[in-house]
Image (cartoon, rainbow, N blue to C red):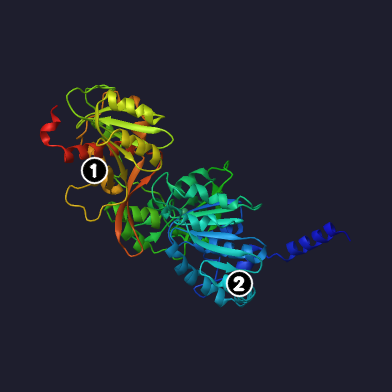
Amino acid sequence: MKRKELENILANLEERTTKDYLDWVYDNWTARGEPLEFVKHKYLEQIYKDQSREIVYCKSAQCGATERMITEALWLPDQFKENALYLFPNTGDVSDLVQERIDEPINASSYLSYVSGRAKRIAGKQADKVGLKRMSKGFIYFRGSNKATQIISVSADALFIDELDRMNQDNVPFFNKRLKHSRRKWLRWASTPTIPGVGIDEKFQESDQHYCHVKCNACNTWQVLDFENNIDQEKLQLVCRECRKEIVPWEMEMKWIPANPDSEIRGYHITQLYSPMLDVKELVKESLKTDEFNKMQFYNQSLGLAYEPKGAKITDADIQACIREHIIPFKEQKEPVFMGVDVGRILHIVIRTKKKVIWIGEVKEFEELDLKMKEYNIRKVVFDALPETRKVQEFINRFKGRAYRIYYTGLKEPKKDEFFRRDGDKVNTDRTLSLDYSGNEIKEQEVELPKNINDYTDYKSQLGNLIRVIAEDKHGNKSATYVKSGPDHYRHAQNYAFIAKGIFEETTTPEAFVL
Ligand SMILES: [Zn+2]
């Protein structure tokens, strides 16, 4: 027999002994001591059966998506000589989750504890590290997405991204490079959403958007369950949107139907409304909270929907309200002028006086900035220090005392009205705090925008692409951060120009405002 034939036979044999994922889960998996059941969790059945190449789960809290991901991530290296990489937002999340959600079920299963026990004997210490498990044939790696160095060393066949919206979005484009050397290239994205157009909401919009339809046993109406139409807030019941009779999702006929069938990416919207754990009373209670933080929690965590908090970004109405009589480019002869520069492949620039925005635009080279310095007689200019540090440094050397680079490093115990701290040509600021200040200047119409601002469409849209969100960490501490929903260069340039004005005011006596 030729070697090739032998290999084929062995490959076929391997194929035959491969256990179907759902059977594997039935036979081996328990959650909190109980085997998974699909009678009451009927909505999860198709989700377990669907092993498309790329899947997006946009979900409310506690509806079974993490379990779905973990089991597949263990099944794959148990059945194939392949590796799974499972990403969490932070390295600190890894050991908690592995102990609670993975070690327990493994120890509860005689097969899985045999497999990982045998792996331990073969691989020694290597298989016993937190964050790494060896299964029958391959490995599963658990990693925090915040440490790029921890991710780039791992090459995988299937990538599981859990809580995408809590991850630093700048790292996300690098994730699927981990699949470069694989033929399988499976991708799984899961998260509760946060704001529209960001993270999982953006991915779900790109997907084929499966929603779960159920058929009322009383009136035969097919419907997708939602809070507004299916919760009776007086009787505290889940009801049919048509006949208002109480309904029980797992006792109804059920179909997942794509709303955007042309997409090649599979997407599921999963909410608590289908879950046997649904607590209608609690849900209604949460829906009545009116502050923006709790409202956002209700939409995101309970309903699995993105929500944009009110007042969280600069709107077009805010911009229109700032329009005054001048037209840009505008040459200011009497007042000192300041410039903010967002450094990237292109330099995005905002030039202003104390009150007016007088030039907005892009240039490619730092040399062109020299010309702007002269043309507008700019007194203070602020750059972001990263990434082009060398060119920024050369510029600062050319314009000593007028040019500064800024770091969004945070301010320790800022005093009242303090939003930056200067040390020579270095300026430190808190990202959220300074964006609050420069954003409020627009919201309160304390800065004047030109009559022709509507010609500057990039500037206008980019001002609105940072959204202020209050997040809570696992210790319950709340803090505000700005989340990017699209290109935000001009929003930062605006912020830097505002800080440049602040530096001038701090370093100059008030009389200097009149030249
Ligand atoms: Zn009905």
Disc marking residue 222: none
Which secondary structure lies at badge 2? helix
Res 257 seen here:
yes
Q: Amino acid at mark 1?
A: Tyr
Position of residue 236 relative to residue 453, above or below, is below
Residue position for label 1:
437
Give the quadrant of residue 441: top left
Disc 1 vs disc 2: Cβ atoms closer than 8 Å?
no
Q: Nearer the viewer, residue 137 or 348?
A: 348
Residue 173: image location, x then y, percent: 50, 47
Q: Residue furthest left?
A: 511
Residue position for label 2:
28
Q: Amino acid at mark 2?
A: Asn
Residue 44: image location, x then y, percent: 54, 60
Position of residue 53 relative to residue 336, above or below, is below
Q: Quadrant of the C terminus?
A: top left
Work out whether mark 1 precedes mark 2 in sequence or the reverse, and give the earlier one: 2
Total marks placed: 2
Q: Nearer the viewer, residue 347 or 232?
A: 347
Q: Is residue 89 left or right of residue 419?
A: right
